[in-house]
Amino acid sequence: MSWPLWEVFVRPRRGLNHQHVGSLHAADAEQALRNARDLYTRREEGVSIWVVPATAISASSPEERDAFFAPAADKIYRHPTFYEVPEGAEHI
Amino acid sequence: MTTVDELLALGDDALIAAQRLAEWTTRAPELEEDVALANIALDLLGQARMLLSYAADLERAGLEGAGRDEDALAYLRGEREFRNAQLTELPRGDFADALVRMLFFAAYQRELYAELAAGPDERLAAIAGKASKEVAYHVDHAIMWTLRLGDGTDESHRRAQAAVDRLWPYTFELFEDRPHLREAWLAAVEPVLAEATLDRPEDGRFRPTGGRKGVHTEHMGYLLAEMQSLHRAHPGASW
């Protein structure tokens, strides 16, 4: 009998988002958190950990890739590149 | 003032516990637990290095520069010169032995380091302060597993109880120099055993001792033979 799979998200610093760093096996959530601490934060990578059962994640299918993502390719007007940047405004 | 012998007792406890725990590397039941045990062994090894370095510095100061360094202390002493408690040198045993021993030993180290961190010896206090955070996690890890094994299947319960019964007599030696710590240790360990549905053994008259004076079990020689073999075959080797 093997332990179920969990996906691990680590927040590297305060103010940043949790990011997916990998997966691991654990019997339950408590153990998954501890295993994540040992596997993914041993070199000071994070300040906060989330673990999510891998079965709870719904993923887009590779077969749907064209329907999902291709239509965005030729719609450059969705990018904010058609504005004049006001003089003196930085960091836009 | 802290003595060389006191530091050797602290350092040897950590060193021998690290060596035993490291035997689990590649043998733990799951990859994740393998990494966890190796991490904990490395924590203990780090504590051993700091404590033995301090012992070496103190010894050299007393001998006006003669004396040994941390490697010589770890790799070139004989069995009778080691000051670790016998609990740390007992054979690896099964997984329940490893985690129950971790519970007993880490709970002791937690009380010990908390006291040393507030003590008058600044260098020792700094080492203890750093180690306290590591040991808090070791206690946490050991509690998690003691609960799972004790309150798990019939087989895991049987093995966990056997480990508790086997190791309990060896816990008395830990408190020989600091008897007052045992009360706090019991207050930490007893509720865990109760929650894990494990019986707390009677305090019997069998209380093995001698480690602090260099008297060890028959298992110690084999442990040292393995731990010291590389250094003895290639003195001063480094990478």
Image (spheres, coloured by chain):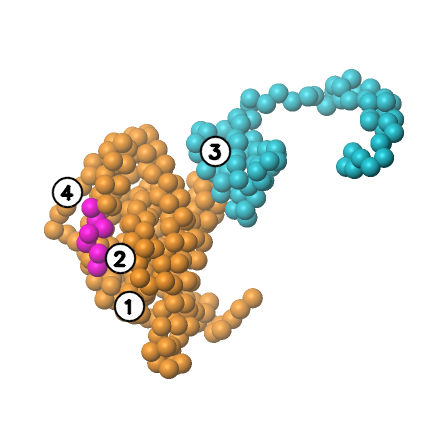
Chain colours: A cyan, B orange
Q: Are marks 2 and 1 in contact (CB under 8 Å)?
A: no
Dot 4: element: loop
**Residue A73 sits above or below residue B83 on the image:** above
Task: Identify the residue position indicated by label 4 in the image.
Answer: B202
Residue at coordinates 53% horizontally, 26% vertically from top-left? Answer: A53
The amino acid type, in three-letter code, at marker 4 is Glu
Q: For marks 2 and 1, give the one nearer the viewer.
A: 1
In the image, are marks 2 and 3 on the same chain?
Answer: no
Task: Identify the residue position indicated by label 2 in the image.
Answer: B86
What is the distance, in whole Å, between disc 4 and disc 3 at their CAs? Answer: 35 Å
Disc sitting over residue A32 in the figure: 3
Label 2 lies in what chain?
B
Residue B102 location, x and y as percent?
33, 47
In the image, are marks 3 and 1 on the same chain?
Answer: no
The amino acid type, in three-letter code, at marker 1 is Met
What is the distance, in whole Å, between disc 2 and disc 4 at their CAs? Answer: 19 Å
Dot 1: element: loop
Label 1 lies in what chain?
B
What is the distance, in whole Å, between disc 4 and disc 1 at their CAs? Answer: 36 Å
